[in-house]
Image (cartoon, grey):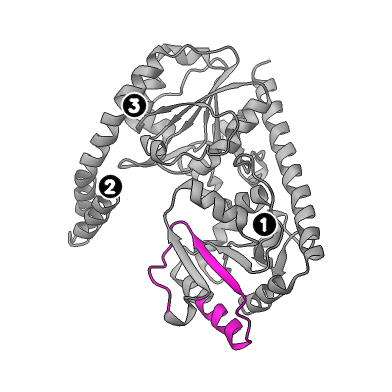
Amino acid sequence: MRNKIYRYLVNFFCLFVPVKLRREKRKQLLLLPEIHKKNLKSKVSYKHFLSETIKEKSVLIVEPNPYHFELLPGFCDYFQKLGYHVDLLAQPVILDDSPFINYPDPPNIFYLSSKYQKKALRLEKIQKYDYVFLSSSVLWGDNVRDSFINFLGYEPNAKYGLLMVEHNVIPYVKDYGHQKYVDNNRTFTLGGQQNIPILNPHYFGNYTVTSKSKLSTFVAVINDQENKQFLFETCRALIKKNITHFKIIVAGRTVITEIPEDLKEIISFTGKIKFVDLWEIYNEADFFLPMLNPEISHNQRYREGTVTGSWQIILGFLKPGLIHSNFADYYQLNSNNSIIFNSNEELVNAIQNAISMTYENYTFLQKNLKDLSEKIYQDSLENLRKRTSYLSY
């Protein structure tokens, strides 16, 4: 909590620095104490890594950023399915909020800041790992916005080299000089974009799939001011139609800071919460609202070079999504596994149809969603198997 308040204060005071370049330099300077604190936390774990014995057929997964942790269980699962022992380097903040809550065989985790990840990956013992797997190809944190390889200044020297995930094929492959990793069969994407093999991590641990509840519950992602108003007006339109027997939970980080009085019975928001609570909300919900909006220009990237994290949640927890038709095909979603609407105005009817949906129809959507989830899982596993077999031949 203190770190969060500190970051807010840094951002606030930097608003009053008139020149952008000076503002960024001042911000970097003010963030140094937080980075120093992370480095101090990393020292003990770095010593543990130094003394760690690397097992045969091991892979080292590295998440450079202080986020993307929700993807780590899925990536670990794929490697373990192929018989690899998994070690993990992740930023120290994962100590306070682990995504491996219901994971049956968690990896050996070393809690290292970007500075100590850089030291660790230079060690001679890295050669004993079959692969170093970067779950994110870039580092956007700790006063760095660059390719993680550029930040390191070298490529980790594992036995069979490096593998990485490009979260934003456009523009990162071009901007950061990563085309060579694509050409050398060392790159995966979360959705198979640009004909780069898919490796989609939508396993979050062992959960019992839930069926439709009596009070229809929707989980929504609201990261744009436009979507905040869009959601509020959609709910007001439903209330005018006397449709009030539902609730919407805006889960995780959001631009929402307050719910209007007339909507408090229907909409709630959590703000940033721990994975143990977030996973429970996802698992107990009935439907998912990614709120991909074709009227917001920067949302177009979610049908081109990158993938919305909502897709992993829909696939992992088998929650039918309500999604605009402009985005549906990109995510292999259709009327057999989701609720599709063709314009923003139609979201009202889409929610109404979800609320009134029969148990049988809901089960039908879930079954088809499960088929899609399993297909993507098997395709991803096979892509990883082929790549590791080819590179180690």
- Say if 321 sits above or below 232 in the image: above
- Say if 371 sits above or below 268 in the image: above
| Residue 111: percent from left, percent from top | 39, 29
| Residue 370: percent from left, percent from top | 75, 49
**Label 3 is placed on what type of residue?**
Tyr
Residue identifier under label 2: 3
Q: Is residue 131 visible?
A: no
| Residue 247: percent from left, percent from top | 57, 70
Could you say whether the residue bearing mark 3 is in a helix, strand or loop? helix
Quadrant position of residue 91: top left
- Say if 71 sits above or below 359 in the image: above
Could you say whether the residue bearing mark 2 is in a helix, strand or loop? helix
Q: CA distance from mark 3 to mark 2?
A: 20 Å
Magenta segment includes 212: no
Query: Considering only order in the chain, which callout, 2 or 3, is on the residue closer to the N terminus?
Result: 2
Residue at x 71%, y 40% (from the top left corner): 377
| Residue 268: percent from left, percent from top | 48, 68
**Label 1 is placed on what type of residue?**
Lys
Query: Which of the image's four quarters has the C terminus?
Result: top right
Residue at x 75%, y 56% (from the top left corner): 366
Quadrant position of residue 36: top left
**Label 2 is placed on what type of residue?**
Asn
Q: Which residues are magenta?
A: 232-260
Residue identifier under label 3: 116
Residue identifier under label 1: 319
